[in-house]
Amino acid sequence: MTTSTALLLADLAGVAVFAASGASAAVAKRLDLFGVVFVGFVAALGGGIVRDLVIDEVPPLAFADWRYAGTAAVTAAAIFWLHPQFARLRTTVLVLDAAGLGLFTVVGTVKALDVQVPAVGACVIGMITAIGGGLVRDLLTGEIPVVLRREIYAVASLVGSIMVVLLHGLGHPGPIPLTAAAALVFGVRLIALRRRWSAPVATMRPPRTGLSGPPPE
């Protein structure tokens, strides 16, 4: 299997995973069929659309290749009809979401490197590819985006992007090293969920209501 074929399959697998995640969130908010499919589509392809616009690949693959839109729409519609069974698989959804995070991180970073984006920019683009759809999904369903909360999510994606860039710089861009990078993101995300790891947050102190000393004369 060539690297391009492996990336295509990884991309479509990530699309299906994130479409299911987005559709599941939309069903929980009691949206109609169109709303569920739309949120699933955006969750699956939003990050990729931003990536393609940033690297000047127009039209974005989400619009140029029917397989992307078709995979997202069919998956989201399936979740609409099968959501009672899917809702009982919360752990499975989290695992699939972690897998999609890893797949999209790798694909986004590799595509950025292929068009000669410098290392730091490629890492950022890879992370945006992975978290962009989920960010819009949460905004559309009225939730604080998971990437802005305490969970280790965007950080896991960034770690994977850095690994892809390092492997590329060392001359190891093949499917096996890239699969290892996706597995790293997947593993970090699952371990963070299992151990309840979280990023630090600011400590909120109550405002001072008065001065401790006597008032000035």
Image (cartoon, rainbow, N blue to C red):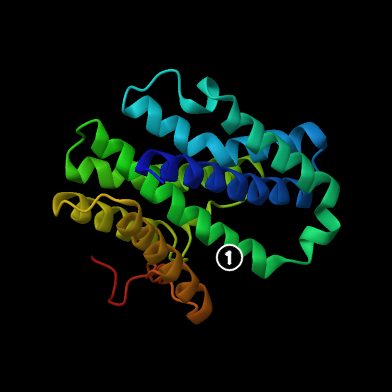
Residue 13: percent from left, percent from top: 55, 47
Residue lying furthest bottom in this view?
195
Picture layout, residue 169 above or below residue 204: above
Residue 72: percent from left, percent from top: 64, 37
Residue lying furthest top in this view?
59
Residue 30: percent from left, percent from top: 82, 46
Q: Residue at x 41, y 64 (%)?
A: 183
Q: Residue at x 77, y 48 (%)?
A: 79
Horizontal arrangement in the rendering, residue 71 relative to residue 53 (left or right): right
Total labels drawn: 1
Horizontal arrangement in the rendering, residue 84 relative to residue 151 (left or right): right
Residue 176 shows in this picture: yes
Quadrant where the image shows the C terminus? bottom left
**Front-most of residues 67 and 84:** 67
Horizontal arrangement in the rendering, residue 123 relative to residue 137 (left or right): left
Q: Quadrant of residue 185?
A: bottom left
Picture layout, residue 78 above or below residue 51: below
Residue 182: percent from left, percent from top: 40, 58
| Crowding near the residue tagged with mark 1, few <14, some 14–19, many ≥20 C-alpha atoms within 10 Å | some
Secondary-structure class at tag 1: helix
Residue 158 shows in this picture: no
The residue indicated by pointer 1 is 95
**Front-most of residues 108 and 207:** 108
Horizontal arrangement in the rendering, residue 119 relative to residue 22 (left or right): left
- The amino acid type found where label 1 is placed reads Val
Q: Residue at x 53, y 47 (%)?
A: 14
Residue lying furthest left in this view?
170
**Front-most of residues 122 and 175:** 175
Q: Residue at x 45, y 64 (%)?
A: 186
